[in-house]
Amino acid sequence: MTRPTYIDPDLVDAERIVLGGSEGRHAATVRRTKMGEQIDVVDGRGLRVTIEVESVTKSEVVGRCLGCVREDARDPHLTLVQALAKGGRDEQAIETCTEFGIDAFIPWMSERTIVRWNDRAKADKGRAKLADTAWAAAKQSRRAYVPQVRPAVTSKELASIIADFDGTVLVCHEEATTPLPQLMPLAGNVMLIVGPEGGISPQEIEAFEGAGARTILLGQHVLRSASAGAWATAVIRAYSR
């Protein structure tokens, strides 16, 4: 059975661990952590420390280190490019894909995306919200790695990223002829691209394929943008080490 997990980016391997800030308050006042209980603290980059709680206040939890491990990153390294969506569907996608094992996210303003982050303030706010979603999902699923949320990109910028990407780029598309399971297993760096509810335009498909991407079919049914990435992630992780 896994232990309750909390995230501290400044975590170091030491004999005594002090969990403060919002995570310490959550452990102490929301979850009501008790003395003698064992919990895990991770740094979001692979370090996991198991502690036995020695003291609890309203703002922090202090414990002695029982063990420390540096977890290896999983292969392949998965980046999800997710088109922005209304109604929190992009947040839903990031939450589920974090639980399933995505390593990084790139928000995408596609041609048919309704939501636009056209100014710096809106982009910063939107990115922070997605990062908070990834943080919470990593904590809930007790991961040692918190996915990185990168700045939003346009279709033109995404095509350039694809051209420079050292790995496999897969575009989820309902008109593709190659089923994703046919490509298993995958290794190295993998980028999954999921379009908006209105679909990826022919011009975008042409640009992405020209940059080195290939289209894949997820199944006989058309999935919503919030679930397509999760389905693909689950398939890839099922075949990975």
Image: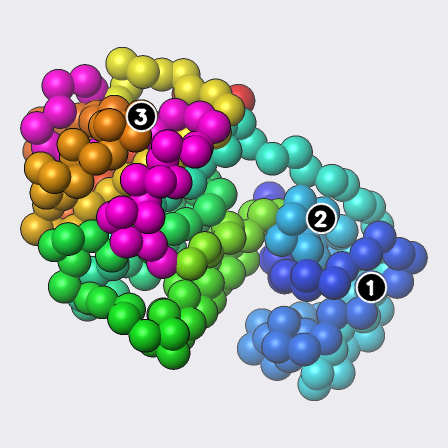
Which label sits on residue 92? none
Q: Amino acid at mark 3?
A: Gly
Where residue 219 appears, as percent x and y from the top left, is 15, 27
Question: Residue placed at 80% from the left, 45% from the top?
Answer: 68
Residue 128 falls in which quadrant of the image?
bottom left
Q: Secondary structure at mark 3?
A: loop
Left or right of 135, for residue 38? right
Task: Give the mark nearest the N terminus, 1 or 3.
Answer: 1
Is 101 in front, or is 203?
203
Residue 86 falls in which quadrant of the image?
bottom left
* Residue at mark 1 to residue at mark 3: CA–CA distance: 47 Å
Residue beneath label 1, please? 17
The crowd level at tag 3 (other Cα within 10 Å; few <14, some 14-19, many 20+) is some
Name the image quarter holding the N terminus: top right
Q: Is residue 31 magenta?
A: no
**Foreground tag (3 vs 2):** 3
The magenta segment is: 152-179
Left or right of 116, for residue 160? right
Left or right of 154, for residue 186? right
Which residue, as the protein is rendered here, is positioned at the far bottom?
58
Which label sits on residue 48? 2
Residue beneath label 3, please? 212
Is 88 in front, or is 156?
156
**Foreground tag (1 vs 3):** 3
Is 85 in front, or is 168?
168
Is 146 in front, or is 159?
159
Question: Residue placed at 76% from the left, 51% from the top?
Answer: 49
Where residue 34 appears, as percent x and y from the top left, is 71, 71
Question: Residue placed at 44% from the left, 26% from the top?
Answer: 167
